Image (tube, rainbow, N blue to C red):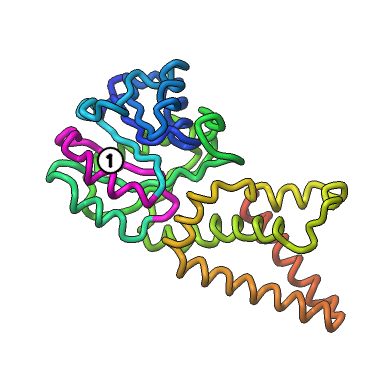
Amino acid sequence: MKSLEETTFAIIGLGLIGGSYAKALKNRNAHKIIGMDRNHIVSLMAKDEGYITDIADEDPSLLQGADIIICAMYPGAFVSFVKDHVKYFKKDVLLTDVMGIKGSIPDEIDRLLGPEMDFVPAHPMAGREGKGYGQSTSRIFEGANFIVIKRKENRPENVAWLRAIALQIGCGRVVELSAREHDGIIAYTSDLPHIMAVSLMNSDSMKENTKYFIAGSFRDATRVADINGTLWSDLFLLNKEPVIAEIERLETQLEKWKKALKEGDRKTLLVMMDEAKKKRRDMFYGKN
């Protein structure tokens, strides 16, 4: 295992997460960071600011020098990128990703890699409003959860290396899950909140003057409605079965609210709210 100061990284896709990776790794003295983006101007900007050392947009052979390749791209582009560029990868490269959905993609990637190459899927649970390199920041990973997908195909030393890097860039905790477990949990903790935020903003109750009656609760509930639609369309569709299941579970909860309100059932309302309050306090502060 190399230290950050000895490691050459390649980051494919210098958007919000890829750009943040470049900034966080540079600030922690990574040896070299090779950048690649479909928008060459973005790559030039990252190099001009000193966050990447080389640009591989027009010379993908530079990827041969990377010990770790971080693919920070849309799920729909990932497999085709590897298929087209694996010939440039170092023979024992560690490949990882940032995707919020895994599905069958890890198996598809494995079939494209050489025998000594290793793909360790990952998902840094970090983000903010907006999209693109301009929104990226080295602080985005501070305190964030970092998910590593457990796979028997991976070499333990590579998993340990990736865990160590996640902690060095500021992540607060590294959790290991199977791809199936990851996709199911993410449908609830990430996909569903984004759907709820978009639905609130698209409600017929949103009028021209509604903005004058908004306080903290509505701002918090709709923060992620400032959404990258291209990316999230991919994520929702690739994870559609677990997402639909979570929408149905939410509908069940809303039906309980509707029934209690129609019947004037104050006791049920109090029970539901007390239960939610206790669960949220336990989640952030632990059980008393």
Residue 257 spot, x, y in % from top left: 75, 74
Tell me the quadrant of the picture where the N terminus can be found. Answer: top left
Which quadrant would residue 43 be assigned to in this image?
top left
Q: Is residue 83 magenta?
A: yes
Residue at horizontal 64%, vertical 60%? 196
Neighbor class of circle 1 (other Cα within 10 Å; few <14, some 14-19, many 20+) is many
- Where residue 72 sits: x, y (%)? 40, 40
Give residue 59's position: percent from left, percent from top: 25, 26
Q: Is residue 97 magenta?
A: yes
Residue drawn at x 25%, y 51% is: 109
Q: Which residues are magenta?
A: 75-101
Disc 1 residue type (three-letter) = Leu
Query: Residue at coordinates 71% horizontally, 56% vertically from top-left?
Result: 201
In the picture, measured across the screen, residue 224 lies left or right of residue 40, that is right
Task: Determine whether 154 is above or below 94 in the image.
Answer: below
Determine the residue located farthest toward the left in the rendered image. Answer: 115
Image quadrant where one finds the C terminus: bottom right
In this figure, which residue is indicated by the disc labeled 1? 95
Is 17 displayed left or right of 55 in the figure? right
> Regarding mark 1 in the picture, which secondary structure is present there?
strand
Left or right: 34 with respect to 28?
A: left
Q: Position of residue 229 (x, y in %)?
A: 54, 50
Q: Residue at x 45, y 55 (%)?
A: 234
User: What is the count of numbered marks?
Assistant: 1
Q: Nearer the viewer, residue 273 or 100?
A: 100
Q: Nearer the viewer, residue 276 or 250?
A: 250
